[in-house]
Amino acid sequence: MTDESRKRLTLFIGECWHEFPHGAEITLDPWYIYCLHCGCQKSNTKPNRTFTTNDDAHALVLKLEEKGMWRGFWDYAMYTWGENDMTPIAYCLFTYWLISNPARFCEMVNEFLEQKGGGDGEG
C-alpha cells in the first residue's frame, strides 16, 4: 500500500496524517519539530498507521458503519471479489474471508474509497 493510500484511509477515519518538515531532524531536536497539519510535537507522536493490523481494520469498519457506508462497501466487495450465485454457506465464508486478513481488508476499503472518490475525511 502506498503512502497516498495510507493517507486516504487515515483521513477517512478522522485522524491526522502526520507530516513533518523535510530535513528538520538534521538541524533540530525532535522535541522542536511539529506536524505540518495538526501541530503535534514529533517526539510525542505515534507513527502514521500502516493499515496492516487488526486495529487498523477495526477503525475502518467502525468508520464505514458510522458514515453509513458499510453496506455499500460490503456490496462492492461482494460484486468485486465474490461470486454471483453464492449459497448461504459460501455467503458466510465470504464474510469471513473479507475480514480475516487485516492488510487485505484495508486494501479493499482503500479501493472502494478510490472508486467512490471519497476517503478525504469529508465522506
Image (spheres, rainbow, N blue to C red):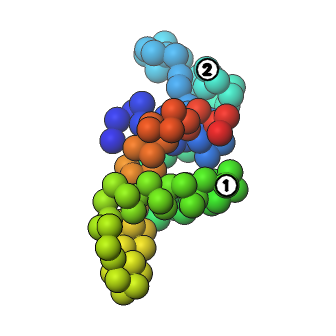
Q: Tell me which residue sits at (44%, 54%) in the image.
A: 76
What amino acid is found at the position of numbered circle 2 in the picture?
Leu
Left or right: 8 with respect to 107? right
Is 52 located above or below residue 3 in the figure? below
Q: Position of residue 53 (x, y in %)?
A: 43, 60
Q: Residue furthest front?
A: 85
Q: Nearer the viewer, mark 1 or mark 2?
A: 1
Left or right: 120 with respect to 104? right
Q: Position of residue 78 (x, y in %)?
A: 39, 62
* Quadrant location of the C terminus in the rendered image: top right
* Quadrant location of the N terminus in the rendered image: top left
Q: Quadrant of residue 66?
A: bottom right
What amino acid is found at the position of numbered circle 1 in the picture?
Gly
Q: Quadrant of residue 15?
A: top right
Q: Quadrant of residue 119?
A: top right
Is disc 1 in contact with disc 2, using a CB cutoff of under 8 Å? no
Q: Residue furthest bottom?
A: 89
Q: Is residue 59 visible?
A: no
How crowded pointer 2 is (Cα within 10 Å; few <14, some 14-19, many 20+) is rated as some
Q: Tell me which residue sits at (39%, 78%) in the image.
A: 91
Badge 2 marks a residue whose secondary structure is loop
Q: Is residue 20 visible?
A: yes
Q: Nearer the viewer, residue 118 or 54?
A: 118
Identify the residue under disc 1: 68
The label on residue 36 is 2
Q: Tell me which residue sits at (61%, 46%) in the image.
A: 13
Is 95 located above or below residue 10 in the figure? below
Instruction: Specify which label sits upstream in the sequence, 1 or 2.
Output: 2
